[in-house]
Image (cartoon, coloured by chain):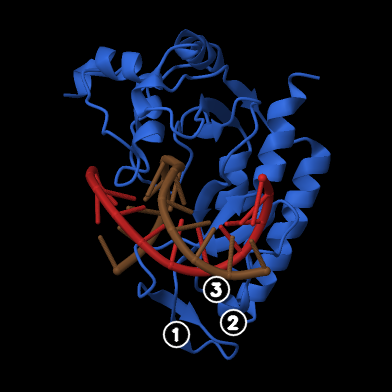
Chain colours: A blue, B brown, C red
Amino acid sequence: MTERWPAPPSSEAELLSRARSLAGRTLGEIAAQMHVTLPANLLRHKGVIGESIERALGASGGSRPEPDLPALGIEIKTIPVDANGKPRESTYLCVVPHGDQHSLSWRDSLVYRKLARVLWVPIESAHGVELKDRRVGQAILWSPTAEEEQQLRTDWEELMEQLALGQTDSVRGVQGTWLQIRPKAAHGRARTAGHDAEGAPTATLPRGFYLRATFTSRLLNRVCL
DNA sequence: TTGTGATCATCT
DNA sequence: AGATGATCACAA
């Protein structure tokens, strides 16, 4: 099974080379070459595009809380864009941690480790276009600028402080300039371990960190300027 | 059960 | 329309 997929790329150059070979092709063509069948739509297969592209590029497709290519420290993100190249959705990063994160620094956080180096793979996903006919765009290998990192860090620290205060359930998606926290669960009744202001254990809705589309739109456009 | 892959669907 | 909150599948 695994033989039909490439081994992890050994360098950024090799990763970019593979990504370039995917650009302009449809998801149907790529799936056929990998001998996988695409579902009719994303309704019950929301992750199928991301998983397919990861495998095509040589990532394991696992669900470990670390970058997709651990040896290179690179995270692979497919991003649905409209005809103008504008992101149609926000980008999920990782789960919101629970427990004592008091001593965790920004640079040691999973949010930073995943954002330090990202291969963004745009997928032209106009509404109504069948999955197999959607095209892969030109991928870009990106790292946050100093300015971007500072703002992301500010968002992260403000949100983490609110979590540390036991106010997880009062966190709203409107918070954060570029980084936000939103629910990330199988359903509304899902619960995970949390804690209140006194540190006593509570059950809370699982949440995740997301990048706003306003942010990804800027970084995707940057290469065109 | 948790974390990853995300998009769906309702509200503003 | 755009953003927020809700939801679906799968691997380990």
Kindly indicate whether the residues beneath marks 3 and 1 are on one polypeptide chain: yes
Label 3 or label 2, whichever comes before in sequence order: 3
Q: Point out residue A84 in the picture as x, y percentages from the top left corner.
A: 66, 26
Q: Is residue A183 above or below residue A68?
A: below
Image marks 1 and 2: residues in contact by CB distance under 8 Å: yes
**Left or right: where does residue A120 sit relative to residue A37?**
right
Label 1 or label 2, whichever comes before in sequence order: 2
Which of the 4 quarters of the picture holds residue A3? top left
Q: Report the mark closest to the observer, 3 or 1.
A: 1
Q: Residue sitting at 50 percent across and 26 percent down?
A: A123
Q: Residues within 10 Å of mark 3 (few under 14, many from 20)?
A: few
The chain containing the residue under callout 3 comes to A
**Left or right: where does residue A107 sit relative to residue C8?**
right
Spatial distance from mark 1 to mark 2, Cα to Cα? 9 Å
- Name which residue type carries label 1: Thr
Q: Which residue is mark 3?
A: A100
Q: Which residue is mark 2?
A: A166
Q: Which residue is mark 1?
A: A202
Q: Point out residue A44 in the picture as x, y percentages from the top left corner.
A: 29, 47
